[in-house]
């Protein structure tokens, strides 16, 4: 039997949970974010497909979402509810495989030895729907990368298979940031080197790219473009590599001493899980909506709150712009 990796991704998860709790919202544009008040500053966490049709998406300011879709129903984020439903979904997935690798609230990898992965995928979709009322999409691949990307082609509520044989047919002409692991900044750097598509990246000499982007990053990017990745699904409990908190202020902060106090306050609210922190990253969103980040290491890695505060303030000191601030965030990155 062939070994396949399946990636299960819940569709419009937060919005779908809210619709389950409020069936009268089914078919309506639903937006989850902040405290649910679109007149306040905040960003969209998730939008239902009905809201997405109006251009509402994750990360969009709530006020912009309200302008784009005035008839949308806005709801506050309810972490406890989402965590409870997520746990039920993951328990359901374990009925199909002894090893389930949880990636977050709404997605997980499974390994399956079968000649018909689509049949298993459809059974998973049916069982998740039966157990929770939620819809999910299942991506199938020969490794984790292929399965993860396949999910995007199967959404919403479908099944899609991506393999070595179909890799370039499906992805070859797409921009490099279509690959899981390549963001807009890396894509821009690649474009500056004349590399714009997955096919072009796959044809690049890894050694040549290593000289421009680093001895590890360069060859790794080429492997991504070739569709090569780890196929092992790990069932160890999911542990986040980082934790973060952020605050959107209803009035702009213009006093930098106040900004420093708020950064320390937010750093103190981040759940470090009593794990050693190796780096602290501070995010500043200036008025009207320019966002920048700076980080600072914690040497040696520490669980001490004072050391984390000191690193956060050191990161903040790297910001030289003193324009009014509308949002502050602090992310702690754990030692491996």
Image (cartoon, grey):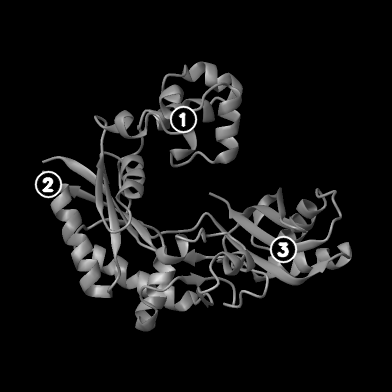
Identify the residue at horizontal 75%, vertical 58% (top origin): 288
Of residue 287 and residue 280, the one placed in the foreground of this image is: 287
Circle 2 sits in a helix, a strand or a loop, which is it? loop
Residue linked to disc 2: 116
Q: Residues within 10 Å of mark 1 (few under 14, many from 20)?
A: some
- Residue 278 percent across, percent down from the top left: 63, 51
Looking at the picture, does residue 326 appear above or below residue 221? below
Identify the residue at horizontal 70%, vertical 56% (top origin): 283
Q: Report the side of 213 relative to 145 (left or right).
A: right
Circle 1 sits in a helix, a strand or a loop, which is it? helix
- Residue 316 percent across, percent down from the top left: 79, 54
Of residue 155 and residue 81, the one placed in the foreground of this image is: 155
**Foreground mark, 3 or 1?**
3
Q: Report the side of 247 relative to 240 (left or right).
A: right
Residue linked to disc 1: 220
As measured in the structure, the alpha-carbon distance from the residue carrying label 2 to the one carrying label 3 is: 49 Å
Quarter of the view holding residue 326: bottom right
Of residue 143 and residue 9, the one placed in the foreground of this image is: 9
Rendered image: mark on residue 327: 3
As measured in the structure, the alpha-carbon distance from the residue carrying label 3 to the one carrying label 1 is: 34 Å
Q: Residues within 10 Å of mark 3 (few under 14, many from 20)?
A: many
N-terminal of the pair, mark 3 or mark 1, is 1
């Amino acid at each position: 039997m062939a070994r396949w990796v399946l990636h299960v991704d819940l569709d419009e998860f937060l919005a779908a949970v809210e619709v389950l709790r409020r069936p009268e919202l089914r078919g309506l544009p639903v937006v989850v974010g902040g405290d649910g008040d679109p007149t306040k500053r905040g960003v969209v966490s998730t939008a239902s497909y009905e809201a997405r049709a109006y251009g509402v998406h994750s990360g969009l300011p709530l006020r912009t979402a309200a302008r784009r879709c005035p008839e949308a129903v806005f709801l506050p984020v309810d972490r406890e509810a989402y965590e409870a439903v997520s746990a039920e979904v993951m328990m359901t997935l374990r009925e199909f495989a002894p090893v389930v690798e949880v990636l977050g609230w709404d997605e997980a990898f499974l390994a399956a030895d079968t000649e018909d992965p689509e049949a298993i995928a459809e059974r998973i979709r049916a069982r998740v729907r039966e157990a929770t009322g939620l819809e999910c999409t299942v991506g199938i691949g020969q490794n984790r990368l292929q399965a993860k990307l396949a999910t995007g082609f199967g959404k919403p509520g479908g099944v899609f298979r991506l393999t070595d044989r179909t890799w370039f047919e499906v992805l070859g002409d797409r921009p490099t940031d279509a690959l899981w692991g390549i963001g807009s900044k890396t894509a821009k750097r690649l474009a500056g080197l004349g590399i714009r598509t997955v096919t072009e990246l796959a044809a690049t000499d890894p050694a040549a790219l290593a000289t421009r982007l680093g001895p590890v990053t360069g060859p790794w990017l080429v492997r991504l473009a070739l569709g090569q990745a780890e196929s092992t699904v790990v069932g160890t409990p999911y542990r986040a590599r980082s934790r973060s908190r952020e605050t959107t202020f209803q009035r702009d902060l213009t006093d930098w001493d106040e900004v420093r106090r708020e950064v320390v306050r937010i750093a103190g609210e981040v759940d470090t899980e009593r794990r050693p922190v190796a780096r602290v990253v501070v995010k500043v969103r200036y008025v009207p909506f320019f966002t920048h980040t700076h980080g600072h290491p914690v040497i040696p890695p520490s669980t001490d709150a004072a050391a984390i505060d000191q690193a956060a303030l050191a990161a903040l000191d790297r910001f030289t712009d003193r324009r009014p601030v509308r949002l502050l965030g602090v992310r702690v990155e754990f030692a491996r």
